[in-house]
Image (cartoon, helix red, strand yellow):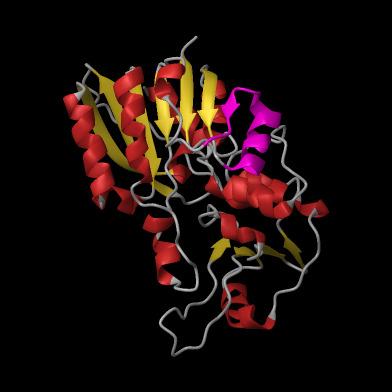
Amino acid sequence: MKTIATIFSGGGGVEVGAIAAGYQPIWGIEKNAAVAEVYRMNLGDHVICEDAQTVNPSGLDRPDVLWASPECQFFSVALQRHSKHQITHNPNLGLCVIPYLETLKPDTFILENVRRYQKHETYTAIVQRLRQLGYWYANFILNAADFGVPQDRKRLILIAKRGEMFLSPIQSGCCRSWYNAIIDLLPELPETVFPPWQHPALKKALQRSQVFMMDGKALRDKVSTHYRLPTTRLSNEPCFTICKWHWKQAIRVHLNDRAVKLTPRAIARMQSFPDDYRLPNDNKLAIQVIGNAVPPLMVQRILEGV
């Protein structure tokens, strides 16, 4: 069985997908203790709760595949639009993957991040070192919705193979709607109301359909640079991009004569997490883990292609 290891592991979304693709996770590195505990209770004690920049890779087992998903707040378009969010993450954090590549020399290296990451000097430095180490690579902008994930989520995926050319396109699957992903959960979702600032968007959405999803963005003053209506998705469309902020920006669904709020379990479905993945009782932590994850189904399909 092929092995996989991850850097910036989060709650183990990559590992969930890797296991489905027939891989065995051997270690993961996650510095946030609460998030690492979620990983541990779902995937095992092989998670290393330390800063990836301080771990010595020479003490780690060599994986067949090394996957890295550096924190992406600095490169997030959504966060850059809103000055109220303080972005404190180091944009050069991804450089710490280079010593792992130099020491472990995995057969395959996969880097995942938001699209803007490829324009930063950190990405350029990683690619240059991959070339020097004898890797062939290809990069893609992939949408999770094309892999059967019920969510629009576009990400940069770099796949590098050591001593082997990788130019084959990644096969995509069919898109799945958010409604079909959670239809069995709808009767048990908690009742809610749309707050006044969402009523303009609510009115527009009702002109199109009686069943739709709406994000929790507040309506801002029309003279504001950031003015926009909340995003809506009809029942035959994938969900908008899930992020960790949705613990306080509730996602609501209009269902003809009732409105409901999505629970962490329903939001996990949008990321293609299986129902046997255990979520923490703390809703903020649960949605942080879900929102920061790579959709497991997307990971599974990518690994099946390499």
Question: In which quadrant will I find the C terminus?
Answer: top left
Measuring from the top left, give residue 266's x and y in whole percent: 69, 49
Q: Nearer the viewer, residue 122 or 264?
A: 122
Q: Is residue 129 above or below residue 88?
A: above
Q: Tally the numbered discs.
A: 0
Asked if one can make out residue 275 in the rendered structure from this viewpoint, the answer is yes
Residue drawn at x 42%, y 43% is 70
The residue positioned 51% from the left and 88% from the top of the image is 221
State the residue at coordinates (71%, 36%): 275
The answer to whether residue 157 is seen in the rendering is no
Looking at the picture, how far across and down is residue 2, in whole percent?
46, 12
* 13 lies above or below 264: above
Magenta part of the chain: 32-50
Relative horizontal placement of residue 291, taking residue 133 as reference (left or right): right
Residue 219 spot, x, y in % from top left:
56, 80
Is residue 41 part of the magenta span, yes or no? yes
> What percent of the width, then of the height, locates residue 188?
82, 52
Name the residue: 59% across, 43% down.
32
Q: Is residue 95 left or right of residue 36?
A: left
